[in-house]
Amino acid sequence: MPEMTEDQKPVKVGDRRVHMANERTFLAWIRTSIGIMAFGFVVERFALFIKQVTYVLGQSNIQTSLPPSHGYSAIAGILLVGLGSLISVLAFIKYKQVERQINEDTYHTSSLLNILLTSSVLAIGIFLVIYLIQST
């Protein structure tokens, strides 16, 4: 006998697996967004760490070994934290859309979130490569 949900619609046993798969996908997107935000935080704080090391060791000793800082790491870190936040919001929106489509039996695939994440990571990777080339 089918179970009843909050809306008192019958839910088939097979539908639970599909809903759980949708939830696992949502949680994977959330883990990805948290990872991106954590990486952004580390990148942003790395500039502060370098400034503190410079101050502690004395500017004359470390100035020759460190490349000049342009402040790009703070910008990159803030952008990464923003990107992670945006991905978490988009993941929730996508989760709710898929949930509705599963309930209505009208599921259609969409690659928008995948394309956004891939292009963002590619752009950040290119930025970091250029930054590292300029700093050497």
Image (cartoon, grey):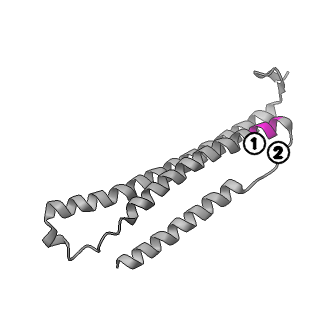
Q: Determine the image quadrant of residue 115.
A: bottom right
- For the residue marked with disc 1, what is the amino acid? Val
- On whether residue 40 falls in the magenta region, the answer is no
Q: Are marks 2 and 1 in contact (CB under 8 Å)?
A: yes
Q: CA distance from mark 2 to mark 1?
A: 7 Å
Q: Determine the image quadrant of residue 75.
A: bottom left
Mark 1, residues whose alpha carbon is within 10 Å: few (<14), some, or many (≥20)?
many
Secondary structure found at label 2: loop
The circle drawn on residue 107 is 2
Residue 103 appears at what percent x and percent y? 81, 35
User: On the image, numbered disc 1 is attached to which residue?
Assistant: 98
Residue 101 appears at what percent x and percent y? 81, 40
Q: Quadrant of the C terminus?
A: bottom left
Secondary structure found at label 1: helix
Q: Quadrant of the N terminus?
A: top right
Residue 127 appears at what percent x and percent y? 49, 70
